[in-house]
Image (cartoon, grey):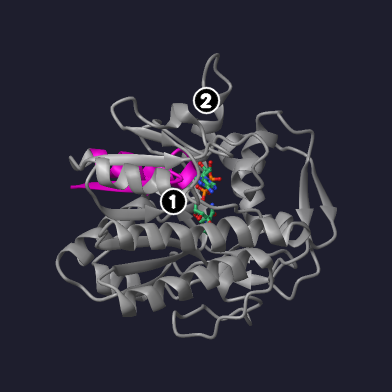
C-alpha cells in the first residue's frame, strides 16, 4: 500500500513527501508541474507528471502503486488571481478535484486528506475562527475549496472513503533541514516576499492595505510552520488508519501577527532594513483570520514544534538564501 500525494512537487506537498519518507512510507507524487518542480521530488519517489483531472492516468497510477491513501494538495492558490480567473479556479480546484475523488472511489482508496483553507470562512469578525463557525468565503478561491469540502463529505457519506479536511491558515517557513521550501519565484506569500526583498531580489515590499480594522491597520494572519503542518497530515493519516471518524480541522497556532509585525521580524532576523511601500487593499483579502487551533491538538494529539515567528522567518530566509546558490531550485 502507498500514499499518493497530489501536488507533491509544490511547496507544502514536498514537505509532506519528506515527512512520509522520514517515517518509511511508500509515496507516489502526482503533479502537472504547473507551479511545482520535478526537482522538489526526491529521486527515490515515483513522480507521475500529469493532471489530476486525467482520470485514466490517475486510475492507472493508483492501481499500479496500490494506493490506499490520497493526500490532496494540488490546486491553484492565489486569491487575487482567482478573482480575475474564477473559471480557471473552479475548474482546477473543484471540477478536477471532483474527478480525483471519483477516481479514488473507483480505485478503492480508503483514506483522503484534503488541503482546505481558512479562506472558506470569509470576512470573519476578528475573533479566532472555530471549525463550527459559518463558512462564507469572499473569493472564488475560497469558494472553489469549500465546494470540494462538500463534494468530499457527500462522497464519504455514500462510499467507503474516510477523510480529514485540514483548513490551513497562512503557511510559511521551510524544512528545518534545508531539503525543500517555497521555490516559486513569483510567490505572493508575505514571509517569502519579505525574505526576497531582504536579500535584494525585489526593490521594495508592498503592504496591501493599512486601513483595516486591526491593531495597526494591516491584515492579521495566523502563520503556521510548514513542517508542523506536514506533521498534522501525518497525524491525520494515523487517525484514519486507526478507524477514526471523518474530521474537519483548522491548522493554525491561534496567534495572529499583522503584516507590519511580520515585516519588522523579517528586518530584525535578516538584519536588513529594506524599503516598504503602502498600497491599497487587494481584492478578496479579509482583515483578520486567526484559528482557534485547539481541536487539531485535542483530536489528533498534534503538538507543534516550530510555533515561533522568528523560527519560521529564520527557516524561510535560509531557504531563500539556498535558492540564490548556483543550480539550486
Ligand atoms: N500556501 C498556503 O499558505 C496555503 C494556505 C491554505 C491552503 N493551502 C492549500 O495547500 C495546497 C498546496 O499549496 P502550496 O502552497 O503548496 O501551492 P503550490 O502551488 O506550491 O503547490 C501546488 C501543486 O499542485 C500542482 N498542481 C496544480 N494543479 C494541478 C493539477 N490540476 N493536477 C496536478 N497537479 C496540479 C502544482 O504543479 C504544484 O506542484 C493547495 O491546495 C492550497 O489551496 C495553501
**Taking 313 as reference, is 143 left or right?**
right
**Residue identifier under label 1:** 55
On the picture, is 178 further left or further right than 317? Answer: left
Instruction: Specify whether tag 1 is near ligand 1 (CB below 8 Å).
Output: no
State which region is magenta: 1-21
The structure residue drawn at horizontal position 17% and vertical position 62%, both measured from the top left corner, is 241
Residue 207's x, y, as percent?
76, 53
Location of mark 2 (residue): 329
Residue 315 to residue 305: above or below: above
Tell me the element at label 1. Answer: helix
* Residue 180, picture quadrant: top left
Asked where in the image residue 45 lies, by quadrant, the reply is top left
Classed neighbour count for the residue bearing mark 1: other residues with Cα under 10 Å, few (<14), some (14–19), many (≥20): some
Q: Residue furthest left?
A: 242
Q: Tell me where residue 104 sits by quadrant.
A: bottom left
The residue lying at 43 percent from left, 57 percent from top is 100
Above or below 162: residue 227: above
Could you say whether the residue bearing mark 2 is in a helix, strand or loop?
loop
Vertical placement of residue 70 versus 204, above or below: below
Location of residue 162 in the rendering, given as x and y in whole percent from the top left corner: 28, 69
Earlier in the chain: of badge 2 and badge 1, it is 1
Amino acid at each position: 500500500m502507498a500514499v499518493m500525494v497530489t501536488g507533491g512537487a509544490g511547496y507544502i506537498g514536498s514537505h509532506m513527501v519528506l515527512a512520509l519518507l522520514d517515517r518509511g512510507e511508500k509515496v507516489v507524487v502526482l503533479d502537472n508541474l504547473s507551479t511545482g518542480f520535478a526537482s522538489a521530488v526526491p529521486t527515490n519517489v515515483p513522480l507521475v507528471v500529469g493532471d489530476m483531472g486525467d482520470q485514466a492516468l490517475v486510475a492507472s497510477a493508483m492501481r499500479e502503486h496500490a494506493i490506499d491513501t490520497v493526500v490532496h494538495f494540488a490546486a491553484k492558490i492565489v486569491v487575487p488571481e482567482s478573482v480575475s480567473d474564477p473559471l480557471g479556479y473552479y475548474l482546477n480546484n473543484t471540477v478536477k478535484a471532483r474527478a480525483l475523488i471519483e477516481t479514488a472511489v473507483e480505485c478503492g482508496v480508503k483514506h483522503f486528506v484534503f488541503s482546505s483553507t481558512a479562506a472558506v470562512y470569509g470576512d470573519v469578525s476578528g475573533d479566532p475562527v472555530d471549525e463550527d463557525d459559518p463558512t462564507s468565503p469572499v473569493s472564488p478561491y475560497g469558494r472553489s475549496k469549500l465546494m470540494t469540502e462538500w463534494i468530499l463529505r457527500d462522497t464519504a457519506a455514500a462510499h467507503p472513503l474516510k477523510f480529514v479536511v485540514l483548513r490551513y491558515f497562512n503557511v510559511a517557513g521551510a524544512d528545518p533541514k534545508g531539503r525543500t521550501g517555497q521555490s516559486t519565484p513569483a510567490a505572493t506569500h508575505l514571509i517569502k516576499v519579505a525574505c526576497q526583498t531582504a536579500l535584494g531580489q525585489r526593490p521594495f515590499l508592498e503592504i496591501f492595505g493599512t486601513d483595516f480594522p486591526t491593531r495597526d491597520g494591516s491584515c492579521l494572519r495566523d502563520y503556521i510552520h510548514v513542517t508542523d503542518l506536514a506533521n498534522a497530515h501525518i497525524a491525520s493519516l494515523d487517525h484514519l488508519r486507526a478507524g477514526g471518524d471523518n474530521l474537519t480541522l483548522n491548522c493554525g497556532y491561534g496567534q495572529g501577527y499583522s503584516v507590519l509585525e511580520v515585516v519588522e521580524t523579517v528586518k530584525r532576523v535578516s538584519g536588513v532594513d529594506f524599503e516598504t511601500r503602502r498600497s491599497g487593499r487587494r481584492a478578496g483579502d479579509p482583515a483578520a483570520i486567526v484559528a482557534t487551533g485547539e481541536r487539531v491538538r485535542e483530536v489528533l494529539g498534534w503538538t507543534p514544534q516550530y510555533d515561533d515567528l522568528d523560527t519560521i522567518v529564520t527557516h524561510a530566509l535560509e531557504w531563500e538564501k539556498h535558492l540564490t546558490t548556483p543550480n539550486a531550485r
